[in-house]
Image (tube, rainbow, N blue to C red):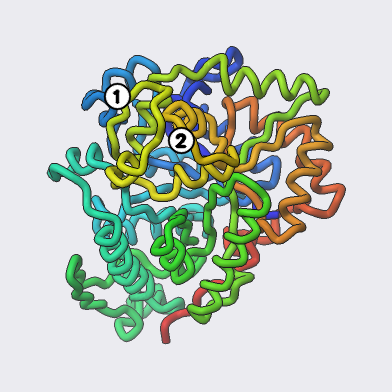
Protein backbone atom coordinates (compact mmCIF):
# COMPACT_ATOMS: atom_id res chain seq x y z
CA UNK A 1 0.00 0.00 0.00
CA UNK A 2 0.95 3.58 -0.62
CA UNK A 3 0.20 5.57 2.54
CA UNK A 4 -0.12 9.35 2.80
CA UNK A 5 -0.74 11.33 6.00
CA UNK A 6 -3.12 14.21 5.28
CA UNK A 7 -2.44 17.44 7.17
CA UNK A 8 -3.45 21.07 7.44
CA UNK A 9 -0.98 23.68 8.66
CA UNK A 10 -3.44 25.09 11.13
CA UNK A 11 -5.80 24.37 13.98
CA UNK A 12 -7.80 21.48 12.49
CA UNK A 13 -7.54 18.41 10.31
CA UNK A 14 -10.12 17.91 7.55
CA UNK A 15 -12.53 17.39 10.43
CA UNK A 16 -13.81 20.78 11.61
CA UNK A 17 -14.23 19.75 15.24
CA UNK A 18 -10.83 18.14 15.68
CA UNK A 19 -9.38 21.02 17.73
CA UNK A 20 -12.05 20.44 20.40
CA UNK A 21 -11.14 16.81 21.07
CA UNK A 22 -9.90 16.62 24.70
CA UNK A 23 -6.49 15.14 23.85
CA UNK A 24 -5.88 17.34 20.79
CA UNK A 25 -2.55 19.15 20.77
CA UNK A 26 -3.20 22.86 20.14
CA UNK A 27 0.43 23.89 19.60
CA UNK A 28 -0.16 24.23 15.84
CA UNK A 29 1.74 27.55 15.76
CA UNK A 30 5.03 25.82 16.63
CA UNK A 31 7.42 23.87 14.45
CA UNK A 32 7.72 21.12 17.07
CA UNK A 33 4.07 20.22 16.44
CA UNK A 34 4.60 19.48 12.74
CA UNK A 35 7.96 17.82 13.25
CA UNK A 36 6.51 15.48 15.88
CA UNK A 37 3.67 14.38 13.59
CA UNK A 38 6.02 13.89 10.63
CA UNK A 39 8.38 11.78 12.74
CA UNK A 40 5.43 9.64 13.86
CA UNK A 41 4.42 9.03 10.25
CA UNK A 42 8.01 8.29 9.29
CA UNK A 43 8.21 5.77 12.14
CA UNK A 44 5.15 4.15 10.55
CA UNK A 45 6.94 4.10 7.15
CA UNK A 46 4.38 6.36 5.46
CA UNK A 47 5.31 7.43 1.94
CA UNK A 48 4.35 11.05 2.37
CA UNK A 49 3.17 13.72 4.80
CA UNK A 50 1.03 16.04 2.72
CA UNK A 51 -0.42 19.48 3.53
CA UNK A 52 -3.62 20.80 2.01
CA UNK A 53 -3.99 24.56 1.66
CA UNK A 54 -6.35 27.35 0.73
CA UNK A 55 -5.48 30.98 0.26
CA UNK A 56 -8.28 32.54 2.29
CA UNK A 57 -10.27 32.13 5.46
CA UNK A 58 -13.71 30.64 4.86
CA UNK A 59 -15.67 33.83 4.25
CA UNK A 60 -18.52 32.99 1.90
CA UNK A 61 -20.97 31.89 4.60
CA UNK A 62 -22.97 35.02 5.42
CA UNK A 63 -20.38 36.97 3.41
CA UNK A 64 -18.21 37.05 6.54
CA UNK A 65 -15.32 35.20 8.19
CA UNK A 66 -16.99 35.60 11.59
CA UNK A 67 -18.31 32.04 12.03
CA UNK A 68 -15.10 30.47 10.71
CA UNK A 69 -13.10 32.50 13.24
CA UNK A 70 -15.56 31.93 16.10
CA UNK A 71 -15.83 28.14 15.55
CA UNK A 72 -12.28 27.41 14.42
CA UNK A 73 -13.40 26.30 10.96
CA UNK A 74 -9.95 26.50 9.35
CA UNK A 75 -9.23 30.18 9.94
CA UNK A 76 -5.48 29.44 10.33
CA UNK A 77 -3.35 28.52 7.33
CA UNK A 78 0.42 28.82 7.74
CA UNK A 79 2.83 29.23 4.84
CA UNK A 80 3.71 25.71 3.74
CA UNK A 81 7.23 26.40 2.49
CA UNK A 82 8.39 27.13 6.01
CA UNK A 83 6.51 24.15 7.48
CA UNK A 84 7.96 21.71 4.94
CA UNK A 85 11.44 23.12 5.49
CA UNK A 86 11.16 22.37 9.20
CA UNK A 87 9.94 18.84 8.54
CA UNK A 88 12.77 18.16 6.10
CA UNK A 89 15.26 18.98 8.83
CA UNK A 90 13.56 16.63 11.32
CA UNK A 91 13.13 13.58 9.04
CA UNK A 92 15.21 11.61 6.57
CA UNK A 93 13.00 9.38 4.39
CA UNK A 94 9.34 10.40 4.38
CA UNK A 95 8.12 12.48 1.45
CA UNK A 96 6.96 16.07 2.03
CA UNK A 97 4.13 17.49 -0.05
CA UNK A 98 2.20 20.75 -0.29
CA UNK A 99 -0.66 22.31 -2.20
CA UNK A 100 0.16 25.23 -4.48
CA UNK A 101 -2.43 26.87 -6.71
CA UNK A 102 -2.07 27.23 -10.49
CA UNK A 103 -4.53 30.13 -10.34
CA UNK A 104 -2.71 32.49 -7.98
CA UNK A 105 0.97 31.58 -8.37
CA UNK A 106 3.32 31.70 -11.35
CA UNK A 107 5.12 28.74 -12.99
CA UNK A 108 8.62 30.03 -12.24
CA UNK A 109 7.80 30.52 -8.56
CA UNK A 110 6.32 27.04 -8.14
CA UNK A 111 9.06 25.36 -10.19
CA UNK A 112 11.79 26.99 -8.11
CA UNK A 113 10.03 26.32 -4.76
CA UNK A 114 9.56 22.60 -5.31
CA UNK A 115 12.91 22.08 -7.03
CA UNK A 116 14.56 23.67 -4.00
CA UNK A 117 12.56 21.48 -1.61
CA UNK A 118 13.47 18.40 -3.63
CA UNK A 119 17.19 19.18 -3.39
CA UNK A 120 17.16 20.10 0.29
CA UNK A 121 15.19 16.95 1.18
CA UNK A 122 17.31 14.61 -0.93
CA UNK A 123 14.50 13.91 -3.39
CA UNK A 124 11.37 13.84 -1.22
CA UNK A 125 9.26 16.77 -2.50
CA UNK A 126 5.73 16.56 -3.91
CA UNK A 127 3.42 19.23 -5.32
CA UNK A 128 -0.37 18.96 -5.12
CA UNK A 129 -1.71 20.79 -8.16
CA UNK A 130 -4.95 22.64 -7.46
CA UNK A 131 -6.87 25.20 -9.47
CA UNK A 132 -8.47 26.86 -6.38
CA UNK A 133 -12.21 26.86 -6.03
CA UNK A 134 -13.78 29.99 -4.58
CA UNK A 135 -14.23 33.72 -4.65
CA UNK A 136 -12.64 34.29 -1.22
CA UNK A 137 -9.27 33.25 -2.60
CA UNK A 138 -9.73 35.41 -5.69
CA UNK A 139 -10.50 38.43 -3.53
CA UNK A 140 -7.19 38.02 -1.69
CA UNK A 141 -5.42 38.24 -5.06
CA UNK A 142 -7.19 41.21 -6.59
CA UNK A 143 -10.10 39.43 -8.30
CA UNK A 144 -13.79 40.00 -7.56
CA UNK A 145 -14.70 36.43 -8.45
CA UNK A 146 -13.10 33.15 -9.36
CA UNK A 147 -12.29 31.71 -12.78
CA UNK A 148 -14.83 29.22 -14.13
CA UNK A 149 -14.23 25.47 -13.96
CA UNK A 150 -12.99 24.89 -17.52
CA UNK A 151 -11.02 28.13 -17.57
CA UNK A 152 -9.19 27.02 -14.40
CA UNK A 153 -8.18 23.74 -16.02
CA UNK A 154 -7.09 25.47 -19.25
CA UNK A 155 -4.82 27.63 -17.14
CA UNK A 156 -3.59 24.64 -15.11
CA UNK A 157 -2.70 22.72 -18.28
CA UNK A 158 -0.53 25.56 -19.49
CA UNK A 159 0.93 26.02 -16.01
CA UNK A 160 2.14 22.39 -15.92
CA UNK A 161 3.63 22.65 -19.39
CA UNK A 162 5.63 25.71 -18.35
CA UNK A 163 6.65 24.29 -14.96
CA UNK A 164 7.88 20.96 -16.31
CA UNK A 165 9.79 22.79 -19.05
CA UNK A 166 11.58 24.75 -16.33
CA UNK A 167 12.39 21.58 -14.35
CA UNK A 168 13.77 20.08 -17.56
CA UNK A 169 15.87 23.14 -18.45
CA UNK A 170 18.92 21.56 -16.77
CA UNK A 171 20.27 18.19 -17.87
CA UNK A 172 21.11 15.68 -15.16
CA UNK A 173 24.82 16.05 -15.83
CA UNK A 174 24.94 19.82 -16.44
CA UNK A 175 26.95 20.55 -13.28
CA UNK A 176 30.73 20.12 -13.64
CA UNK A 177 32.08 22.09 -10.64
CA UNK A 178 35.73 21.70 -11.61
CA UNK A 179 37.49 24.03 -9.18
CA UNK A 180 40.84 23.72 -10.91
CA UNK A 181 39.65 24.64 -14.40
CA UNK A 182 37.03 27.07 -13.18
CA UNK A 183 34.23 25.44 -15.20
CA UNK A 184 31.06 25.32 -13.09
CA UNK A 185 28.46 23.93 -15.52
CA UNK A 186 28.07 23.07 -19.20
CA UNK A 187 26.09 25.87 -20.90
CA UNK A 188 25.02 23.45 -23.65
CA UNK A 189 23.11 21.51 -21.00
CA UNK A 190 21.25 24.48 -19.49
CA UNK A 191 18.56 25.91 -21.76
CA UNK A 192 16.10 28.76 -21.95
CA UNK A 193 12.58 27.40 -22.28
CA UNK A 194 11.02 30.45 -23.99
CA UNK A 195 7.53 29.23 -23.17
CA UNK A 196 4.67 31.34 -24.54
CA UNK A 197 1.01 30.55 -24.07
CA UNK A 198 -2.32 32.25 -23.53
CA UNK A 199 -1.80 32.59 -19.77
CA UNK A 200 1.92 32.45 -19.14
CA UNK A 201 5.18 33.56 -20.70
CA UNK A 202 8.42 32.26 -19.20
CA UNK A 203 11.96 32.68 -20.51
CA UNK A 204 13.94 30.44 -18.15
CA UNK A 205 16.16 28.59 -17.48
CA UNK A 206 15.26 27.70 -13.91
CA UNK A 207 17.77 28.90 -11.33
CA UNK A 208 17.81 25.47 -9.64
CA UNK A 209 19.62 22.48 -11.22
CA UNK A 210 17.76 19.31 -12.06
CA UNK A 211 16.55 17.60 -8.91
CA UNK A 212 17.14 14.16 -7.38
CA UNK A 213 13.70 12.99 -8.56
CA UNK A 214 14.14 14.56 -12.01
CA UNK A 215 10.88 16.31 -11.30
CA UNK A 216 9.10 16.54 -7.94
CA UNK A 217 6.24 14.07 -7.56
CA UNK A 218 2.89 15.44 -8.78
CA UNK A 219 -0.38 15.01 -6.86
CA UNK A 220 -3.87 15.86 -8.11
CA UNK A 221 -7.42 15.43 -6.83
CA UNK A 222 -9.83 16.47 -9.57
CA UNK A 223 -12.98 14.30 -9.71
CA UNK A 224 -14.87 15.85 -12.62
CA UNK A 225 -14.34 14.53 -16.14
CA UNK A 226 -11.93 17.36 -16.89
CA UNK A 227 -10.15 16.78 -13.58
CA UNK A 228 -9.70 13.07 -14.31
CA UNK A 229 -8.23 13.84 -17.72
CA UNK A 230 -5.81 16.33 -16.18
CA UNK A 231 -4.74 13.79 -13.56
CA UNK A 232 -4.29 11.09 -16.19
CA UNK A 233 -1.84 13.28 -18.09
CA UNK A 234 0.14 14.76 -15.21
CA UNK A 235 -0.34 13.11 -11.81
CA UNK A 236 1.82 10.51 -10.07
CA UNK A 237 -0.66 10.26 -7.16
CA UNK A 238 -4.40 10.80 -7.60
CA UNK A 239 -6.44 11.57 -4.48
CA UNK A 240 -10.09 10.46 -4.59
CA UNK A 241 -13.10 10.71 -2.26
CA UNK A 242 -15.33 7.80 -3.22
CA UNK A 243 -17.84 6.84 -0.52
CA UNK A 244 -18.17 3.13 -1.17
CA UNK A 245 -16.26 0.17 -2.50
CA UNK A 246 -18.16 -0.30 -5.77
CA UNK A 247 -17.92 3.40 -6.64
CA UNK A 248 -14.20 3.35 -5.85
CA UNK A 249 -13.67 0.31 -8.08
CA UNK A 250 -15.38 2.05 -10.99
CA UNK A 251 -13.34 5.21 -10.43
CA UNK A 252 -10.11 3.21 -10.17
CA UNK A 253 -10.75 1.39 -13.45
CA UNK A 254 -11.76 4.59 -15.24
CA UNK A 255 -8.73 6.55 -14.03
CA UNK A 256 -6.25 3.79 -14.90
CA UNK A 257 -7.74 3.53 -18.39
CA UNK A 258 -7.39 7.28 -18.89
CA UNK A 259 -3.73 7.08 -17.79
CA UNK A 260 -3.07 4.38 -20.40
CA UNK A 261 -4.74 6.47 -23.10
CA UNK A 262 -2.12 9.17 -22.46
CA UNK A 263 0.61 6.61 -23.18
CA UNK A 264 1.65 6.32 -19.54
CA UNK A 265 2.13 3.16 -17.48
CA UNK A 266 -0.95 2.83 -15.21
CA UNK A 267 1.25 1.20 -12.53
CA UNK A 268 3.17 4.49 -12.31
CA UNK A 269 0.05 6.35 -11.13
CA UNK A 270 -1.26 5.56 -7.66
CA UNK A 271 -4.98 5.99 -6.94
CA UNK A 272 -5.54 6.86 -3.27
CA UNK A 273 -8.94 7.47 -1.65
CA UNK A 274 -9.01 9.80 1.32
CA UNK A 275 -10.09 7.86 4.39
CA UNK A 276 -10.03 8.04 8.13
CA UNK A 277 -9.45 5.30 10.67
CA UNK A 278 -10.89 5.25 14.17
CA UNK A 279 -9.09 2.55 16.14
CA UNK A 280 -10.24 1.22 19.51
CA UNK A 281 -9.23 -1.55 21.86
CA UNK A 282 -12.70 -3.02 21.23
CA UNK A 283 -15.30 -2.45 18.51
CA UNK A 284 -17.61 -0.64 20.93
CA UNK A 285 -14.82 1.71 22.05
CA UNK A 286 -14.04 2.57 18.41
CA UNK A 287 -17.71 3.21 17.63
CA UNK A 288 -18.07 5.46 20.67
CA UNK A 289 -15.00 7.44 19.59
CA UNK A 290 -16.49 7.81 16.12
CA UNK A 291 -19.77 9.06 17.60
CA UNK A 292 -17.87 11.73 19.50
CA UNK A 293 -16.07 12.83 16.35
CA UNK A 294 -19.26 12.97 14.29
CA UNK A 295 -21.63 14.55 16.80
CA UNK A 296 -20.14 15.93 19.98
CA UNK A 297 -17.54 18.35 18.63
CA UNK A 298 -18.99 19.51 15.30
CA UNK A 299 -20.77 22.85 15.40
CA UNK A 300 -23.29 23.29 12.54
CA UNK A 301 -22.02 26.80 11.79
CA UNK A 302 -18.49 25.46 11.33
CA UNK A 303 -19.79 22.81 8.95
CA UNK A 304 -21.76 25.33 6.91
CA UNK A 305 -18.84 27.75 6.77
CA UNK A 306 -16.64 25.03 5.29
CA UNK A 307 -19.40 23.77 3.00
CA UNK A 308 -19.96 27.28 1.66
CA UNK A 309 -16.26 27.61 0.97
CA UNK A 310 -15.99 24.30 -0.88
CA UNK A 311 -19.11 24.86 -2.97
CA UNK A 312 -18.52 28.61 -3.49
CA UNK A 313 -22.13 29.13 -2.42
CA UNK A 314 -23.57 30.95 0.62
CA UNK A 315 -25.54 28.43 2.69
CA UNK A 316 -26.40 31.08 5.29
CA UNK A 317 -29.57 31.72 3.29
CA UNK A 318 -30.81 28.18 4.08
CA UNK A 319 -31.91 26.28 7.16
CA UNK A 320 -30.20 22.97 7.92
CA UNK A 321 -33.33 21.02 6.98
CA UNK A 322 -33.89 22.75 3.63
CA UNK A 323 -33.76 20.31 0.70
CA UNK A 324 -30.84 20.42 -1.71
CA UNK A 325 -32.36 21.49 -5.02
CA UNK A 326 -31.09 21.38 -8.59
CA UNK A 327 -31.12 25.18 -8.62
CA UNK A 328 -28.85 25.20 -5.58
CA UNK A 329 -26.23 22.90 -7.09
CA UNK A 330 -26.37 24.65 -10.46
CA UNK A 331 -25.66 27.96 -8.71
CA UNK A 332 -22.45 26.57 -7.23
CA UNK A 333 -19.16 27.13 -9.06
CA UNK A 334 -17.23 25.06 -6.50
CA UNK A 335 -16.26 21.42 -6.42
CA UNK A 336 -18.46 19.38 -8.71
CA UNK A 337 -19.84 16.06 -7.70
CA UNK A 338 -20.01 16.53 -3.90
CA UNK A 339 -23.79 16.29 -3.79
CA UNK A 340 -23.81 13.23 -6.04
CA UNK A 341 -21.19 11.57 -3.85
CA UNK A 342 -23.29 12.15 -0.73
CA UNK A 343 -26.37 10.73 -2.50
CA UNK A 344 -24.43 7.58 -3.35
CA UNK A 345 -23.15 7.28 0.20
CA UNK A 346 -26.60 7.68 1.78
CA UNK A 347 -28.30 5.73 -1.04
CA UNK A 348 -31.06 8.29 -1.42
CA UNK A 349 -31.80 11.38 -3.50
CA UNK A 350 -33.63 13.59 -0.99
CA UNK A 351 -30.66 15.40 0.50
CA UNK A 352 -30.84 18.28 2.94
CA UNK A 353 -28.34 21.00 3.71
CA UNK A 354 -27.68 19.15 6.98
CA UNK A 355 -26.60 16.04 5.01
CA UNK A 356 -24.10 18.03 2.96
CA UNK A 357 -22.75 19.84 6.02
CA UNK A 358 -22.28 16.62 7.98
CA UNK A 359 -20.44 14.92 5.16
CA UNK A 360 -18.22 17.90 4.52
CA UNK A 361 -17.34 18.37 8.18
CA UNK A 362 -16.53 14.75 8.99
CA UNK A 363 -15.05 13.32 5.79
CA UNK A 364 -17.93 10.91 5.30
CA UNK A 365 -17.55 11.20 1.53
CA UNK A 366 -14.58 8.82 1.75
CA UNK A 367 -14.32 5.40 3.39
CA UNK A 368 -14.42 5.14 7.18
CA UNK A 369 -12.50 2.33 8.83
CA UNK A 370 -13.79 1.93 12.37
CA UNK A 371 -13.02 -0.83 14.84
CA UNK A 372 -10.22 -2.77 16.44
CA UNK A 373 -6.81 -2.69 14.77
CA UNK A 374 -7.54 -6.07 13.17
CA UNK A 375 -10.90 -4.87 11.87
CA UNK A 376 -9.44 -1.65 10.44
CA UNK A 377 -6.70 -3.67 8.72
CA UNK A 378 -9.35 -6.03 7.32
CA UNK A 379 -11.29 -3.15 5.78
CA UNK A 380 -8.21 -1.54 4.28
CA UNK A 381 -7.10 -4.90 2.87
CA UNK A 382 -10.50 -5.42 1.26
CA UNK A 383 -10.28 -2.09 -0.56
CA UNK A 384 -6.67 -2.63 -1.57
CA UNK A 385 -7.09 -6.16 -2.90
CA UNK A 386 -10.40 -5.65 -4.71
CA UNK A 387 -9.24 -3.16 -7.33
CA UNK A 388 -10.46 -0.05 -5.53
CA UNK A 389 -7.16 1.65 -4.71
CA UNK A 390 -3.37 1.49 -4.49
CA UNK A 391 -3.34 2.75 -0.89
CA UNK A 392 -4.85 5.56 1.15
CA UNK A 393 -4.66 9.22 2.07
CA UNK A 394 -5.24 8.88 5.79
CA UNK A 395 -6.89 11.90 7.43
CA UNK A 396 -6.77 12.34 11.19
CA UNK A 397 -9.85 12.79 13.33
CA UNK A 398 -7.62 14.51 15.91
CA UNK A 399 -3.90 15.23 16.24
CA UNK A 400 -1.50 13.81 17.02
CA UNK A 401 -3.42 10.90 18.57
CA UNK A 402 -5.10 9.52 15.45
CA UNK A 403 -1.79 9.03 13.64
CA UNK A 404 -0.04 7.74 16.76
CA UNK A 405 -2.74 5.11 17.33
CA UNK A 406 -2.72 4.03 13.68
CA UNK A 407 1.06 3.67 13.56
CA UNK A 408 1.20 1.79 16.87
CA UNK A 409 -1.82 -0.48 16.35
CA UNK A 410 -2.62 -0.92 12.65
CA UNK A 411 0.67 -0.60 10.78
CA UNK A 412 2.23 -3.72 12.42
CA UNK A 413 -0.76 -5.81 11.30
CA UNK A 414 -0.52 -4.55 7.72
CA UNK A 415 3.20 -5.34 7.78
CA UNK A 416 2.60 -8.85 9.11
CA UNK A 417 0.15 -9.48 6.27
CA UNK A 418 2.68 -8.34 3.68
CA UNK A 419 0.53 -5.36 2.68
CA UNK A 420 2.88 -2.59 3.79
CA UNK A 421 6.62 -2.04 3.89
CA UNK A 422 8.78 -2.65 6.93
CA UNK A 423 11.59 -0.44 5.62
CA UNK A 424 11.88 2.36 3.10
CA UNK A 425 12.88 1.32 -0.41
CA UNK A 426 15.38 4.06 -1.23
CA UNK A 427 16.28 7.69 -0.65
CA UNK A 428 13.68 9.43 -2.85
CA UNK A 429 9.91 9.61 -2.79
CA UNK A 430 9.76 8.05 -6.24
CA UNK A 431 11.77 5.12 -4.84
CA UNK A 432 9.15 4.59 -2.11
CA UNK A 433 6.31 4.82 -4.60
CA UNK A 434 7.97 2.51 -7.11
CA UNK A 435 7.50 4.96 -9.99
CA UNK A 436 9.98 5.89 -12.68
CA UNK A 437 12.25 8.90 -12.48
CA UNK A 438 11.88 11.15 -15.55
CA UNK A 439 15.18 11.33 -17.39
CA UNK A 440 16.77 14.36 -18.98
CA UNK A 441 14.92 15.61 -22.02
CA UNK A 442 17.97 14.90 -24.18
The correct choice, above or below, for 175 with respect to 117 in the image is: below
Q: Nearest the camera: 314 or 3?
A: 314
Mark number for residue 8? 2
Residue at (33% x, 74% y) in the render? 165
Check the image and report above or below for 374 versus 107: above
| Residue at horizontal 62 percent and vertical 54 percent from the top | 248
Q: Which residue is mark 1?
A: 316
Distance CA(mark 2)–CA(mark 1): 25 Å
In the foreground, 399 or 312: 312
Tell me: 73 left or right of 151. right
Q: Residue at x 19, y 66 (%)?
A: 199
Quadrant of the drawing holding the C terminus: bottom left
User: Are circles 2 and 1 on residues that touch, CB within 8 Å?
Assistant: no
Q: Position of residue 283 (x, y in %)?
A: 80, 25
Q: In this image, 271 relative to 376: left or right?
A: left
Q: Give x and y (percent) for residue 140.
A: 19, 38
Q: Is residue 41 above or below residue 402?
A: below
| Residue 437 in view in this figure | yes
- Quick one: label 2, few (<14), some, or many (20+) residues within 10 Å? many
- Taking 275 as reference, is 134 left or right? left
Question: Measured from the top left, where is residue 90 in percent x and y?
Answer: 55, 39
Give the quadrant of residue 321: top left
Instruction: State which mark lies toward you, 2 or 1.
Output: 1
In the rendered image, the residue lying farthest to the right is 416
Check disc 1: other Cα within 10 Å, few if <14, some if 14-19, many if 20+. Answer: some
Asked if 341 appears above or below 220 in the picture, the reply is above
**Residue 176 placement (x, y as % from top left):** 41, 77
At numbered mark 2, what does the secondary structure look like: helix, strand or loop? strand
Q: Quadrant of residue 332?
A: top left
Q: Of the two numbered discs 2 and 1 on the same chain, state the one appearing first in sequence.
A: 2
Picture residue at 48% right of the left edge, 20% below the top: 27
Amino acid sequence: MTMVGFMQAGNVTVYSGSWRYPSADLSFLTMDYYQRIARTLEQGKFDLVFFDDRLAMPGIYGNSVAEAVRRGARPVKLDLTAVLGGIIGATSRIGVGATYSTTYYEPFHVARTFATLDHLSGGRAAWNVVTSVNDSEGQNFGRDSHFGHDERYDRAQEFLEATTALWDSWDDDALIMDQESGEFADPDKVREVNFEGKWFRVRGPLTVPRTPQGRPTILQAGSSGRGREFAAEWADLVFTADPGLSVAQQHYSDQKQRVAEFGRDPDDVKILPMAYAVVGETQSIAEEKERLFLDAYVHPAASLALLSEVMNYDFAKHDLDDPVTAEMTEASSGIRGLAEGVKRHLNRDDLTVRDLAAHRATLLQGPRFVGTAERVADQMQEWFESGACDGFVLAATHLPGAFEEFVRMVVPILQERGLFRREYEGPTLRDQLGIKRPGSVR
